[in-house]
Amino acid sequence: MTESANLSSIYNNLIHLGDYYPLEIIIEKEEADNAINNFKEKWQPYNPRKENKRFGLSLTSHDGSIDGPNQIDLDSLHEYNKLHNTSFEEDSFKTKTSVFKSFSKLQKDLEPISQYICRSHIIKLNAGGFFPPHRDLDPKTFRLISLSNNCSISNFVLLLNNQRIFLDQQHLYFLNTRVAHSVFSFEDDVFFFVFNILVNIETASFVRSKLLEK
Ligand SMILES: [Fe+2]
C-alpha cells in the first residue's frame, strides 16, 4: 500500500466512528484557568495579515517559543508558505512550549502519543472573531479539539458541514476537519484548544482506546 493510501485508510477508520465524537480525556478547568491567567500577556494575533478578533497561544511551536518575532505556528501555514516560499507543515511544530508544560494532567493523558503531537494551540476569540468555512486537508494529521472557557451555546457557534454542532466543554473531541467547518464568537474571551496529531496506527489506536462511548 502506498504511504498516502495507508494514511487515508487509517483516517477513514477514525471517521468511520463519526465526524466528531468525545474522548474520555478532559482538560481540567483549573489547568485551563491557570494557563489563561498566567500567560495573559502572551496572546499573539492569529494569522496577523488578516484583521480578525482572534488570538493564539502556542502549545507547541517550531522551537518551543511562545512570543518570538516569527510565531509561524500561529499563522495560516498555507498563506505563510506561499508568501515566503517555505514549506512548513503541521509537523514542523512539535516542540512543547511552557504553556503546554503547565498542563500536567493533560500532558500525562496524552503521554502515549506525545511524540506525535504537532502544531497545537489555544485559540481565543473576542466578540466578532471567527474562522470562515474551510477544510484542513493535510493528509498527515487529524485534529483533536476541546471547547474551553466561555464556549457556551449562546456565546459560540461551531458549524460542521453547514450544521451547528454542540460539544461538551472540557472534553477532548475527535473532529473531522476535512469536512468544511467554521466558528464564530458573539462574546469576548472565548477559548478553545486545537491539537494536530500525526495520522498513524498508534495515534488511531489511542483515539479508539479513549472513546467516551465504547
Ligand atoms: Fe480548521
Image: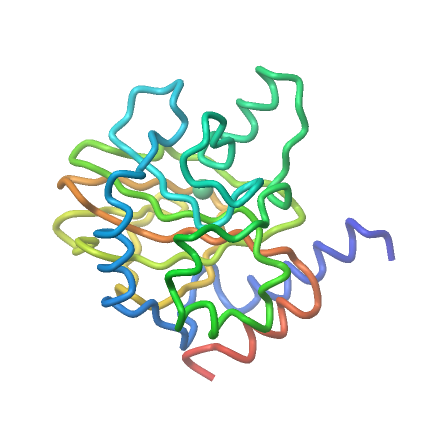
User: Dividing the picture into quarters, in which one does residue 28 lie?
Assistant: bottom left
Q: Of 50 and 68, which appears nearest the observer?
A: 68
Horizontally, is 144 left or right of 31 in the view?
A: right
Query: Which residue is at the far top?
Result: 83
Which residue shows up at 22% across the image and 59% down it? 33
Residue at the extreme bottom: 214
**Ligand 1 visible in quadrant:** top left
Is 88 left or right of 45, judged from the image as shown? right
Residue extending farthest to the right is 1
Position of 173 with respect to 125 (left or right) is right
Query: Quadrant location of the N terminus?
Result: bottom right
Give the image location of residue 204, x and y in percent.
62, 68
Image label count: 0
| Left-right relation of 57 to 205 | left
Residue closest to the eye, 29 or 178: 29
Residue 108 lies, with reference to residue 48, above or below; the image says below
Q: Position of residue 60 (x, y in %)?
A: 50, 48
**Residue 67: horizontal and vertical position, in percent?**
40, 35
The quadrant in which residue 11 appears is bottom right
197 and 44: which is toward the camera = 44
Q: Which coloring applies here?
A: rainbow
At horizontal 48% and vertical 65% (from top left) the residue drawn is 18
Q: Residue at x 41, y 79 (%)?
A: 212
Q: Residue at x 47, y 32 (%)?
A: 71
**Relative vertical location of residue 161 with respect to residue 73 in this rendering, above or below:** below
Above or below, 141 relative to 56: below
Q: Return the x and y of residue 166 as percentages of the image width and height.
A: 27, 59
Q: Nearer the viewer, residue 6 or 53?
A: 53
